[in-house]
Image: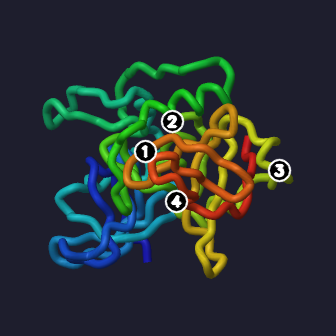
Amino acid sequence: MNKGICIVTVAPVRAENSDRAEIVTEILYGESADILEVNKNWTKIKMHYDGYEGWMDTKQIKPVTEEYLANRKVTLITEDFSSVMTLDGKTLLSMGSEVEFPAVASRRSHDLRESIALTAKEFLNIPYLWGGKSFFAVDCSGFVQLVYKIHNIKMPRDTYQQAEVGEALSFVEESQPGDLAYFENSEGKIIHVGIMLENQKIIHASGKVRIDTLDSSGIFNKELNKHTHKLRVIKSVL
């Protein structure tokens, strides 16, 4: 049963109520969630943005009322990172964070596809982290979700969920910047996603956020001189 709602400072969300448990995702500053359960120093939440559930340190949450949440006016941080003053002092925030005070809400281009591509490129060389979803470290689906969130497009959290959204393209050559390419393992399970750029380039989080070439077989890594990911489908969600 829902035991209340909260706003989060910023924290990893874990599979179990333990510091040793797997990080399944991150919740960014200002995002809200339902409180499902409290167990000593741990609180189980269900994120409002994508419905993801997990455990986080109780010290990282701020309980609020439904009325407060309904009347809250927030600005989405769209810069690489922003150093802002909060009630708790100066804080460094990732893009995608939600703040309750005026903030610069920039746009890289008036063209949506170009803007998505430009935003994605700002993440180049950001390290890969399983469960990461911020400008400081990302996994492949967290990267996609965050870039699209900045453009007010809501995407699910996990790769297989994202693959259910949008319209499939017939050929790689049909792809445009902002389209999403999905990749499968040897068992046919979708395990990876990246954002298409111009000229059949793809930007994705694999070891770090990087740009590679995509062909009908998949992602070709020039440094390794081989294909690293097998293409399943390309989809347009725009």
State yes or no: discs 3 and 2 in contact (Cβ < 8 Å): no
Q: CA distance from mark 1 to mark 4?
A: 17 Å
Residue 61 percent location from the top left of the image: 26, 56
**Mark 3 Cα within 10 Å, few/some/many (few <14, many 20+)?**
few
State yes or no: discs 4 and 3 in contact (Cβ < 8 Å): no
Q: Which residue is mark 4?
A: 157
Q: Earlier in the sequence, mark 1 or mark 2?
A: 2
Foreground disc of the pair 1, 4: 1
User: How many numbered tags mark residues here?
Assistant: 4
Q: CA distance from mark 4 to mark 2?
A: 17 Å
Foreground disc of the pair 3, 2: 3
Q: Earlier in the sequence, mark 4 or mark 3?
A: 4
State yes or no: discs 4 and 2 in contact (Cβ < 8 Å): no
Q: CA distance from mark 3 to mark 2?
A: 23 Å
Q: Which residue is mark 1?
A: 209
- For label 1, the SS is strand
Q: Quadrant of residue 73?
A: top left
- For label 4, the SS is loop
Viewer-nearest residue: 224 or 237: 224
Q: Earlier in the sequence, mark 1 or mark 3?
A: 3
Q: Quadrant of the C terminus?
A: top right
Q: Quadrant of residue 122?
A: top left
Q: Would you place residue 138 above or below residue 56 in this image?
A: above
Q: Would you place residue 178 above or below residue 12 in this image?
A: above
Q: Which residue is mark 3?
A: 171
Would you say residue 177 is visible in this rendering?
yes
